[in-house]
Amino acid sequence: MIQYFGRVMLYSLLLTELSELAVSLLWGIRGRNLLYVAAVNLLTNPVYVYLVLRLKIRMHPDRLTVVRIVMECLIVLAEGLWYARKLDRERHPWLLSLTANLASIAAGIWLSRS
């Protein structure tokens, strides 16, 4: 079970980093700001994945879907706040957060269905 959790968390983090950093690069984020985006994802993704894995055991799938949507919205808000405070010259930190997270979610859905 621990190996499964670890593997899922690692794959999820790698997918999140790749997709959100790709969006950030397309957004024009470079240098230290790009490292900051990666660091923010190192904070938010493992917590999210761990909670989802734990709740998956105890919660009905429909309720879990609602909880996941709420958690994703909180992550978008938290990351947007961090980006607004720390990214140099970023004019649309909230939109960056939303776009990057949507890309990450889409990549996860696409991979899970293939």
Image (cartoon, grey):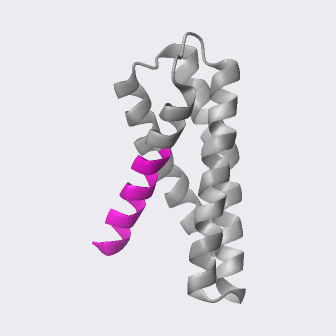
Dominant secondary structure of the residues highlighted in magenta in the image: helix
Q: x and y percent of residue 60 in the render?
A: 63, 89
Q: x and y percent of residue 8 in the render?
A: 55, 67
User: In the figure, 79 relative to 57: above or below?
Assistant: above
User: In the figure, 104 relative to 81: above or below?
Assistant: below
Span shown in magenta: 101-114
Comparing 95 with 23, the one in front is 95
Asked if residue 82 lies in the magenta stretch, the reply is no
Which residue in the rendered view is the most extreme toward the left?
A: 114
Q: x and y percent of residue 36 in the render?
A: 62, 26
Is any atom of residue 1 visible in this view?
A: no
User: In the figure, 104 relative to 97: above or below?
Assistant: below
Classify residue 109 as left or right of residue 3.
left
User: In the figure, 59 relative to 87: above or below?
Assistant: below
Choose top left, top right, bottom left or bottom right for residue 107. Answer: bottom left
Choose top left, top right, bottom left or bottom right for residue 37. Answer: top right
Q: How many labels does the image show?
A: 0
Asked if residue 107 lies in the magenta stretch, the reply is yes
What residue is at 65 percent from the left and 42 percent from the top? 77
Comparing 31 with 98, the one in front is 98
What residue is at 27 percent from the left and 72 percent from the top? 114
What residue is at 61 percent from the left and 53 percent from the top? 73
Figure quadrant of the N terminus: bottom right
Is any atom of residue 49 visible in this view?
A: yes
Classify residue 81 as left or right of residue 11.
right
Q: x and y percent of residue 6 in the render?
A: 63, 66
